[in-house]
Image: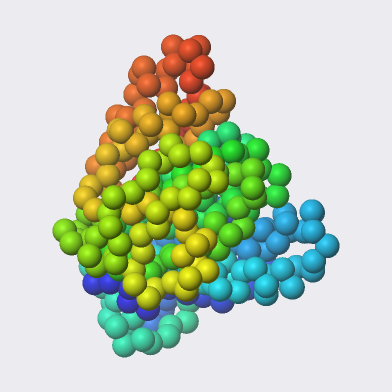
């Protein structure tokens, strides 16, 4: 399906034997779309393997896997139950894929994978993910995995996403709602979305853009900003930890703020343009996350960078 002029979402029914971990990629072969019949194009898997979540939850619950997925994950599809890929449209193969998506057509896809490493971020005390546009292909499943991990030691998880328009929120809003609902009481969840393309965001989103500080204590209600009519009242209540602002994000200020509040171990995951990755690296340079910071009580920071290019 065509999500925007430059993003195609590809949804595949997940075979029962196919399992993957957050951050992994798969090679897609589409003979009816590609120039050559066996061209293989790598894409990051943007969904979370819900069987892993069910297995983790069932360690502490007596519900069956089937009932758990039906009751808790039903409205979170496709990001919980299917193989999902967010494809950036450029030229060649992706351009042809966009043409197929514009007609709402279906294609036969062969999946080879998964490939690549996957880091267990549930062992960190604080986990921060930063993404721009389709960079959520990497950070969203990482975010969901930290929340859904059965024995996570994480105390705070932060999801930062920069988008070009408020309508981009539609891509993953149900997954974010479900993630907040699944978060255990011991985990503080905070979601910050920056709309860089709409100067009249506060009007189009139906709420005032003045928002609470992210340093508020866990359990303190925060103002929700969302599109009119996009979520039910119960979903709105579930998304109290969401903060949406217009304008560009400031990774330097955002990460320094998180570091100032954190202790122990902290992971920072980033996926997006070279500019976003460069800004995150710059924000974490010495002495912000160096030995002197750790000796004075600051967190030990580990950076994970996922870059994407042309397929």
In the rendered image, the quadrant that contains the N terminus is bottom left
Residue at (37, 52) in percent of width and height: 243
Residue 18: x and y in percent read 63, 66
Does residue 146 lie above or below 50 as drawn?
Answer: above
Residue 239: x and y in percent read 47, 59
Name the foreground residue: 27 vs 51.
51
Q: Tell me if I can see residue 226 in this picture.
A: yes
Name the foreground residue: 164 vs 215.
215
Which residue sits furthest left?
A: 199
Name the foreground residue: 34 vs 208.
208
Residue at (80, 66) in percent of width and height: 63
Residue 178: x and y in percent read 55, 63
Residue 34: x and y in percent read 34, 75
For the rendered model, the colour scheme is rainbow
Name the foreground residue: 81 vs 214.
214
In the rendered image, the quadrant that contains the C terminus is bottom left
Q: How many marks on residues?
A: 0
User: Is 54 situated left or right of 280 in this image?
Assistant: right
Q: In which image quadrant can residue 214 be found? A: top left
Residue at (37, 21) in percent of width and height: 288
Does residue 47 lie above or below 254 as drawn?
Answer: below
Residue at (36, 86) in percent of width and height: 104
Q: In which image quadrant can residue 252 be found? A: top left
Q: In which image quadrant can residue 206 be found? A: bottom left
Q: Tell me if I can see residue 20 in this picture.
A: no
């Amino acid at each position: 399906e065509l999500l925007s002029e430059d993003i195609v979402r590809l949804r595949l029914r997940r075979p029962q034997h196919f399992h993957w971990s957050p951050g992994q990629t798969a090679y897609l072969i589409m003979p009816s779309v590609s120039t050559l019949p066996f061209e293989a194009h790598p894409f990051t898997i943007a969904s979370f393997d819900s069987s892993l979540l069910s297995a983790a939850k069932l360690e502490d619950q007596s519900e069956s896997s089937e009932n758990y997925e039906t009751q808790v994950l039903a409205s979170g599809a496709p990001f919980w139950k299917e193989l999902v890929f967010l494809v950036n449209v450029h030229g060649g193969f992706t351009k042809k894929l966009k043409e197929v998506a514009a007609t709402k057509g279906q294609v036969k896809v062969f999946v080879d994978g998964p490939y690549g490493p996957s880091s267990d971020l549930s062992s960190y005390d604080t986990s921060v993910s930063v993404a721009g546009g389709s960079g959520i292909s990497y950070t969203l499943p990482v975010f969901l995995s930290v929340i859904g991990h059965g024995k996570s030691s994480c105390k705070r998880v932060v999801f930062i996403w920069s988008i070009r328009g408020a309508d981009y929120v539609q891509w993953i809003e149900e997954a974010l709602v479900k993630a907040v609902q699944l978060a255990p009481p011991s985990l503080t969840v905070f979601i910050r979305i920056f709309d860089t393309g709409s100067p009249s965001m506060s009007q189009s989103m139906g709420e005032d853009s003045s928002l609470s500080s992210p340093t508020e204590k866990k359990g303190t209600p925060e103002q929700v900003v969302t599109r009119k009519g996009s979520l039910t009242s119960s979903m709105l209540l579930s998304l109290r930890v969401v903060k949406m602002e217009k304008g560009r994000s400031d990774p330097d200020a955002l990460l320094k703020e998180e570091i100032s509040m954190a202790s122990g171990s902290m992971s920072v995951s980033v996926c997006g343009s070279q500019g976003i990755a460069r800004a995150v690296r710059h924000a974490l340079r010495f002495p912000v996350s160096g030995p002197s910071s750790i000796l004075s009580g600051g967190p030990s920071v580990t950076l994970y960078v996922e870059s994407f290019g042309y397929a």
